[in-house]
Amino acid sequence: MTTTVTGGRGGTDVSALPPSPQPPGATPPAAPSSEPVRPAGRSGLGRVGRPLGVGVVGLWLSVMVLLPLAALTVTSFEDGWGGFWEAVTAPVALASLRVTIVAAVVVALVNAVMGTLIAWVLVRDDFPGKRIVNALIDLPFALPTIVASIVLLSLYGPNSPVGIHLNATQPGLVLALAFVTLPFVVRSVQPVLIEADREVEEASASLGASSWTTFRRVVLPTLTPAIISGTGLAFARAIGEYGSVVLIGGNIPRETQVASQYIQQQIEIDRPVNAAAVSVALLAIAFATLAVLRWYAGRGLRREEDSA
Amino acid sequence: MITVTGARKSYGDFTALDDVSLEIPAGTLTALLGPSGSGKSTLLRAIAGLEGLDGGRVVIGGRDVTGVPPQKRGIGFVFQHYAAFKHMTVRDNVAFGLTIRKRPKAEIARKVDDLLEIVGLDGFQHRYPAQLSGGQRQRMALARALAVDPEVLLLDEPFGALDAKVRADLRQWLRRLHDEVHVTTVLVTHDQEEALDVADRIAVLNKGRIEQVGDPVALYDRPANDFVMSFLGSVARLGGQLVRPHDIALHRTRERALQLDARVGGSPGVIEAVVERVVRLGFEVRVDLRADTGERFAAQLTRAEADALALQAGDTVFAHTVQAVNPAEAEPALAI
């Protein structure tokens, strides 16, 4: 064994890993102050391990992510910049992108509010069946999305037992996207709320703040990073959603056809360049979303951890 | 002035407060002292309104606030773990109570600057709590509580999370601060030294009841019972009676011991004991002894006394108390 663990540093890397959806800015006070991640050579495998690890990771990312993305981008520019631009700005393509983005924004905002509310109720309130409800939150995520579509169709479709017909409408589209993106905000806000220091709220109350003022000025700011990260992930997911909107969305061009459906359609009628071009547009949006999230998380991190 | 009457509070089977009545005079710094689980924090939180009572009343400054929420009690509360608003600067933290009262900006700025100067955080206005040390954070929390001009200031183990040196400095500082601002202050602590050091008055709690209330000297010299005595300083058991180790005198001869012991009333008499160990602790010397009854106890001597006796392990000495301790004659616990 060639491992050369330097004293006490072994655990640092673990604590420096961000606990998945929870943004680093919201790290509870009790958590060990995250030190900068040590270079792998010092804490993990020895000199042999480092190039090997970097090599494997590089290869994996290349085969899985970078090369396909590059290939897609190359395909989209097969007819040159002009061809790409034409494909993206074709009226139906543009309409599908607009429908996608508008629906995703609406869904993200609905999630930001409802997800926070659900997380709040699950953490702060006690009611019978709480554990079951808590487990149910992940169901839309775990369910095959086409099943989600059928589920929604059976309730809000043409044969709706409750008389609500959302089949092939934009509200139907939003409903389907909201269904599959439900867990994102809930699951990112929940751990932050669980870790939240209740004394801070008591301090606020002792200073004369009403419950609402305490929520708005003390609790909400600590939840904001988690809400934004969850909302961003929900948005990114909604942008690319396909399965759940296939049945209830209706696929009506310029109305309920989302970008992913447009791409599928273009492939079917053998227009790979059009498909690739719109895909690259989606890719750019997703990438921009993630970049903004990272920037935001980094900003929060600096503000709370910087001890200059 | 705070008056608590007949306060009762249980959590399931656990009784946190068992019919507690206490009067805290205006302008004093009173310590609620007791071991963990004695109900001292519960009592403080009940005064603040952060904890509801099962029974009893709380009156602050002549106003019955029993059912009043903490927002409207006119209190300032300081928590053991600071409860800082992490997303706000030091200035915004301290200004919070004034900001939500929508006071004019200029007034808030002036008051916050004044307070930060008082607590020694001048120049830290734009820092975030994460950029302060524990002691600084607690001083910020104190300034924040004082900003709203509370009628009473309530401190829940305010120095509990700090290391020993900062702790000692901060309690001196708190005492000086109290002498300046004179706000009625209640401090919860499990540290008898801290209570003796800063408080004008101490209420000793045990198992949800108040054992004794009084000034530090009275409590130390005339404890109402064995619990108060052993909680407020070290004790030795001499002839079945609790005495302070520094109240034990040692002599080489029984005659001398008897002669001096006769002057002290109610003492356990002269005890013959064998020296087991002599420990020099700077100016003080602790002598570990075993009485002829087999009972072990320790005496605390000055260096000069120990040198005069030239004690060695194995020597036989005669011990007696120089101070009579008779709990029965001491002041009883204040009952209202």
Image: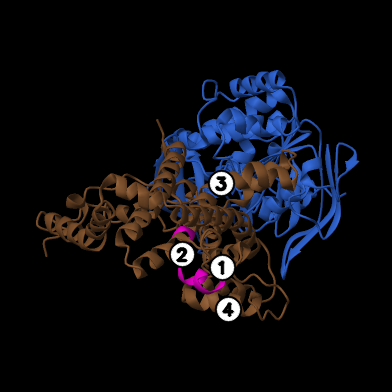
Mark 4 to mark 1 CA distance (whole Å)? 10 Å
Closer to the N terminus: mark 1 or mark 3?
Answer: 1
| Badge 3: chain ID | A
Closer to the N terminus: mark 4 or mark 2?
Answer: 4
Q: Are marks 4 and 1 in contact (CB under 8 Å)?
A: no
Chain B visual colour = blue
Mark 2 to mark 1 CA distance (whole Å)? 9 Å
User: Residue A275 or B95: which is nearer the viewer?
Assistant: A275
Question: In the picture shown, does residue B107 fall above or below A229?
Answer: above
| Badge 1: chain ID | A
Closer to the N terminus: mark 4 or mark 1?
Answer: 4
Q: Which residues are magenta?
A: A238-248
Residue with the mark numbered 3 = A222
Q: Are marks 2 and 1 in contact (CB under 8 Å)?
A: yes
Please give left or right for residue A261 compared with residue A205 in the image. Answer: left
Residue with the mark numbered 1 = A176
Residue with the mark numbered 2 = A241
